[in-house]
Image (cartoon, grey):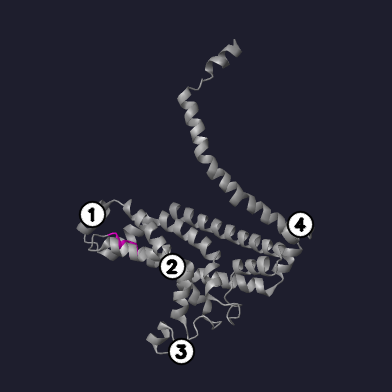
Amino acid sequence: MANETKTATKKKWTSQEKNECIWGWAFILPTMIGLIVLNIYPIFKTIWESFFKTGDFGRGNIFVGLANYQKILGDATTWQALVNTFKYAIIEVPFSIAIALVLAVFLNRKMVGRAAYRTIFFLPMVAAPAAIAMVWRWLYNSEFGLLNHMLGAKINWISNPSIAVYAVAVIGVWSILGYNMVLFLAGLQDIPRDYYEASSIDGANGIYQFFHITIPLLSPTIFFVAITRVIGGLQVFDLIFMVMDKNNPALYKTQSLVYLFYQESFVNNNKGVGSAIVVFLLVIIMVITLLENKAQKYVYYN
């Protein structure tokens, strides 16, 4: 009787359900394979290699334990690169979020040429990084750059160790504004207009509505953008690589942890140390992301 009951309760799949299951797996398998091959496997492979002194072409690896971590943690270059990375992120993240939020609020209103303005602000996102670097290197040129010409000064924007990292961060702010703005525009579409209309009847102005309606209701999107931008800011590489020359005197005060990983792995051919740098950065990003999530929950429940 028990076996008959179990058999009776088993649901037979119809041909349509079988087809849906097969096609469902067929559609998600390429993505799953891509994630495993391009994301998950490299993570574990990088952690594994951080404990080895890697040989040529991945052969002849020698297990060295925590020696690679001791090397990077005892090297002043690593800590300087970490400071440089934080300097870049401290400038790029808050400014890109604040400016993009203000732009999104203005471009969310009915105005002439709104679509054109949105396109113009988003254009840096589709521009080639190499082209962006070339244009900004010309703008920052100390001899005939446009910025120095407009200011009537001769400032070494990208060769002065004191300001080079901030100059590169300005490029990062400019290039990511469009992406952040689109995310904020999407979040603003979900805020009912009734709140603004009711507050306008009560005499609230635009500034009051921005701080007491827009920001609170847009906080989930703001936290999402903040988390993604912190991760992106801590992983900066392409701007520094293309703007700063190898012989630039400000490179030591500008190179990020990812740039240092590139130098160790592909220039010095020491992939074990490079892997240790990546794991070190991964731990930092995980800690910061965890703190941001805690802050988000604290804001929501308080």
Q: Which residues are magenta?
A: 103-108
Residue 223 image-quadrant placement: bottom left
28 sits to left or right of 267: left
- What residue is disc 4 on? 59
Q: Earlier in the sequence, mark 3 or mark 1?
A: 3
Task: Name the element at disc 3.
Answer: loop
Q: Would you name the residue on which mark 1 appears? A: 198
- The answer to whether residue 163 is above or below residue 124 is below
Q: Are marks 4 and 1 in contact (CB under 8 Å)?
A: no
Residue where numbered disc 3 is placed: 154
Among all residues in the image, which is located at the extreme left?
A: 201
Q: Label 2, on which residue? A: 175
Q: Are marks 3 and 4 in contact (CB under 8 Å)?
A: no
**Residue flagged by tag 2: what amino acid is it?**
Ser
Q: Residue at x 49, y 82 (%)?
A: 157
Vertical order, 29 against 225 (above or below): above
Q: Is residue 302 visible from the viewing direction of this image? A: no
Q: Position of residue 39 (x, y in %)?
A: 59, 51
Separation of marks 2 and 3 at Cα, in angstroms: 25 Å
Q: Residue at x 47, y 30 (%)?
A: 20
